[in-house]
Structures are given as C-alpha cells and as structure tokens.
Image (spheres, helix red, strand yellow):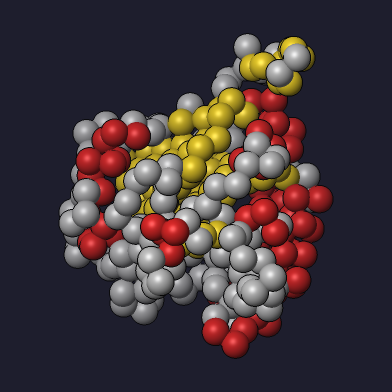
Amino acid sequence: MRFISWNVNGLRACEGKGFSEVFRALDADFFCLQETKMQAGQLDLQYEGYQSFWNYADKKGYSGTAVFTRHTPLNVTYGIGIDEHDHEGRVITLEMDDFFLVTVYVPNAQDELKRLDYRMRWEDDFLAYIKSLDAKKPVIVCGDLNVAHQEIDLKNPKTNRRNPGFTDEERGKFTTWLESGFTDTFRHLFPEQVTYSWWSYRFRAREKNIGWRIDYFVTSKRIDDRIADAKIHTEIMGSDHCPVELVLCKFKIEVQFSGRGKDKI
C-alpha cells in the first residue's frame, strides 16, 4: 500500500506546474496534501477511482490540507477537536479498517519565533490527539511537520540554531513524540542518509541542495514490521517541497543479515 505526502505550497499554482501528471505517475493509494492555500470551489480536481476530502483555513489563501484516497474510509474528521487549533485547516483524519491516516500541516514558529509558544501548545495537544487514536488502532501521520529533528536533517545546522524549525524546543517535542511509541519511517530505514524535502526559493538553494528534511511519515511503532520502503522524491518539482512516500506491507517483513547488512524479503 503506497502513501504519498506533499506540501504543494499552493495547489492552484502547483497544478499549473504539473501536479496532475505527478499525481498519476506516483499511483498512490493515499495522496495527502498540505498548504493547499485555497477555498472550496476554487479548483476542481477529480481523478478516476479516487475520493477526496478537504480542510480549508478560515483565512483565504492560507494553510489547508487534503487527502485523495482509493479506499473508502469508515469515518473522516477535520481538526483535532480543540477550537484554538481548528480554524487553519491543518488536520484531516481518515479512519480505515485497521489504521488511522492523519495528514497534518504543523504551524511554523515564524520569524523571531513569534509563534513558538503557540507551537508548543499545538505539539502537546496534537500528540495527545495522536495517542488517543493509537489507543484504538495504529496511526500513520504524514505531512509537513516544520521541524528538522537532527543535525543530519538540514544542510547548515550550526547557522540555523534558534531558527524556526530547528529550535531545541521543537526538536525536543519531536523526540518526545517518537519516545511515545512512534517511528520516523525514513530514519528507520535510512539512519544515515542525507536527503532533504524542502529548499528555500532564495539563493538557488535547491540547485545547491541547501535543504531541510521537514516532511515525514510517522507511524505507530507496533507496525514497524510493515514498513517496506520510504522515499523522498527530490526529482519532483512544482513546490519548494518535494513529495515523500511510504510503502507498507500487509504482512510482516522478514529480515536476514548478510555481509551487506539488512536484506528485505
């Protein structure tokens, strides 16, 4: 089962840069979007075999999330049930037979960390929400989490200390999340690989690969044995982010050890 997550930084603009072609080529079971930056009726995207669900921010041209799915959910909810957090279109949850899928666009702490205090409240409340779901069935969370967890996750860690997305506070909250029974799927498979998912539009950052890894799939630790693959599609343009991918197997992956390390069978 293939999952894709992409911060499109404005879906109408991204569609003009080939979004639909990318959508069809990636051929996902679930395709999750963040920062759609649109309201209902502004763009009619329909794909054969898919249903779609949308969460719009109250503020026009801001934030927003969406999910396209080939599989009919048991239930769909919007937000996390806390009024302070539920006016910016940041969360959609699909309840499936054997898991919850949550797409999220985590609030940025903003320049001069003006929104860091709010971000900390969000982190606590969102983790409580995810844990409440996890008590019922495994959870797959994907999206722009607006944090580079470790120094390996951005090109210039020393000069970005105390910048939004790389504060000790934000990184610590993500550590707490993982320690609560969740897995960063890309790092689970590729603990030392340097690959980024976001680049500034300034200073030819993408051309120079001066980037950050801030887009994730995070899953309940008890389904680690179902993680078959994780990818960051750096070759795909159309946004300042690129799509990230998770492939889950229905059955446990057996692992052998050879002279080269782990071999998935």
Q: Is residue 112 above or below residue 144?
A: below
Q: Residue at x 59, y 25 (%)?
A: 228
Q: Residue at x 64, y 26 (%)?
A: 226
Q: Is residue 263 visible?
A: yes
Q: Is residue 123 visible?
A: no
Q: Position of residue 113 (x, y in %)?
A: 62, 84
Q: Position of residue 3 (x, y in %)?
A: 46, 37
Q: Is residue 216 above or below residue 174?
A: above
107 sits to left or right of 204: right
Q: Position of residue 175 (x, y in %)?
A: 77, 57
Q: Is residue 207 above or below residue 5?
A: below
Total numbered labels placed on residues in the image: 0
The image quadrant that residue 89 belongs to is bottom left
Q: Which one is in front, 2 or 68?
A: 2
Q: Which quarter of the image is occupied by the C terminus?
A: top right
Q: Residue at x 74, y 12 (%)?
A: 258
211 sits to left or right of 124: left
Q: Position of residue 248 (x, y in %)?
A: 56, 28
Q: Residue at x 55, y 84 (%)?
A: 111
Q: Is residue 228 above or below residue 180?
A: above
Q: Can you name the residue that lies furthest to the front here?
A: 208
